[in-house]
Amino acid sequence: MIMQNIYALKGNICYSKDQKTIEAVENGYVVVENETSRGVFRTLPEKWANAPVTDYGDKLIIPGLVDLHIHAPQYAFRGTGMDLELLDWLNTYTFPEEARYGDLEYAELAYSLFADDLSKGATTRAVVFATVHVPATMLLMEKLERSGIVSLVGKVNMDRSSPAGLQEESAERSANDTIGWLHSCVGKFKNTSPILTPRFIPSCSDDLMRRLGDIQKAFKLPLQSHLSENQSEIEWVSELCPWSMSYGDAYAQFGMFGGENVNAVMAHCVWPTSGEIELIRKNGVYVAHCPQSNMNLASGIAPVRKFLEKNLNVGLGSDVAGGSSASVFRAMSDSIQVSKLYWRLVDGDSAPLTVEEAFYLGTLGGGRFFGKAGSFDDGFEFDAVIIDDGSIIGPAKPNIHDRLSKVIYLSDDRNIIAKYVRGEICGG
Ligand code: GUN
Ligand code: FE
């Protein structure tokens, strides 16, 4: 007989039904069977009357947060080097820092810090850039597996326009290292798996992109990269790829921009052309909106209202260390704030994002990249965060909507009392 593990959590349950609607069930039950949610109920259904119940009282129970874009090797220097724009920032701060990950002792220290901190926060799923180095990338994957969260981790590919000490020797070497890495990590972990990671067009030759396209097909890998983040970057891509119609089209011509067999997520998309937006929609590409990074690197403000109106797949990314904070709650409040500046300064027809929309982006919007994640509806993988908002709630007893808004704007790791990933309790 197969053992079924069924239990329920009781508390104030909030989750997104869609872009615009948060379902809030006070003193409700979420039923979990093995890894999967069986739904949210006002009273415990008869058929599960004997299931053990963990009663979280007046606490909030929300889906685990999803970070669609974070650079693990940039975590150690976050909060510094914020005086430059993208291309100079990469050359001056980021590439020299990433070169250090050839040294496993450095990687051990820095990746421990990253994985420990991530396990204490509200993130339960993350799409992660590592560096070009295979041994350090394996180390990162082991640490993330131990942290309990679900992650997609990418060994980075870069064979041009990068400094000696970080740039890979040739397209062939980069592709071979990638294949070697995939052989050692595919199927090795329960919660940690590989994602193909051409850094961005300027750092990958056409030869490398073709080879990576073949690897994507052979291993059926998801893919992550950067798209239309900064105007000088976009100009550079149009010089490098004169045969492309847009930055997105350059990826598409290598078979790396979504479509039937490619689950792709592109960070930023601050300056998309209308053709690029249409290609993103048609190919089901995910956009990782990274508002804090876009402020820090003065990249601009992504037209997220437009993305939502066109029903694109959109989630949030912290983009550490472009973003200084790894908190997806912070990404939610930043996304609302930058959307207000966009509305006021750029386009009076692009209404600011609401709390409901920001919460959606950081849960279900990004969660869908992983399949059925980011909601408590029946059939979703059960990732949850239990929040004690006692320290931020104030004496006026706000309603559930306002409590959730306060959590988004004000909570930190001290408010998290438990975290569940794929049905299991995890972390601190
Ligand atoms: N484009 C290419 N590499 C990077 C990176 O590390 N961070 C950001 N924000 N953009 C990039
Ligand atoms: Fe990035």
Image: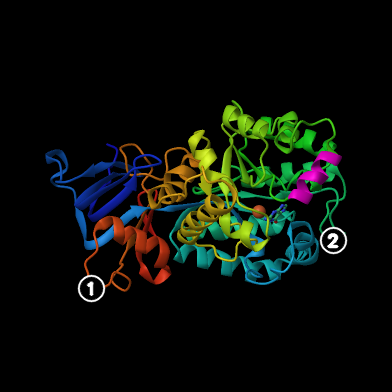
> Which-is-in-front pick, marks 2 and 1?
1
Would residue 37 be seen by someone viewing this image from the given angle?
Answer: yes
User: 100 or 316, which lies in front?
Assistant: 316
Q: Residue 27 at x, y = what percent?
A: 18, 54
Which element carries disc 2, helix, strand or loop? loop
Which element carries disc 1, helix, strand or loop? loop
Highlighted range, magenta: 231-239
The alpha-carbon separation of the residues under discs 2 and 1 comes to 56 Å
Would residue 418 be seen by someone viewing this image from the given angle?
Answer: no
Secondary structure predominantly adopted by residues drawn in magenta: helix
User: 424 or 370, which lies in front?
Assistant: 370
Mark toward the start of the polypeptide (2 vs 1): 2
User: 233 or 41, which lies in front?
Assistant: 233
Residue found at x 63% / y 56%: 294
Q: Amino acid at mark 1?
A: Pro
**Picture quarter with ligand 2:** bottom right
Q: Residue 327 at x, y = what percent?
A: 50, 62
Q: Residues within 10 Å of mark 1 (few under 14, many from 20)?
A: few
Residue found at x 62% / y 34%: 277
User: 391 or 421, which lies in front?
Assistant: 391
Residue, disc 2 = 165
Report if residue 184 lies within the magenta region.
no
Residue found at x 52% / y 33%: 310
Q: Amino acid at mark 2?
A: Gly
Residue, disc 1 = 395
Q: Residues within 10 Å of mark 2 (few under 14, many from 20)?
A: few
Quadrant into which the N terminus falls: top left
Residue 370 horizontal side relative to residue 384, left or right: right
Q: Are marks 2 and 1 in contact (CB under 8 Å)?
A: no
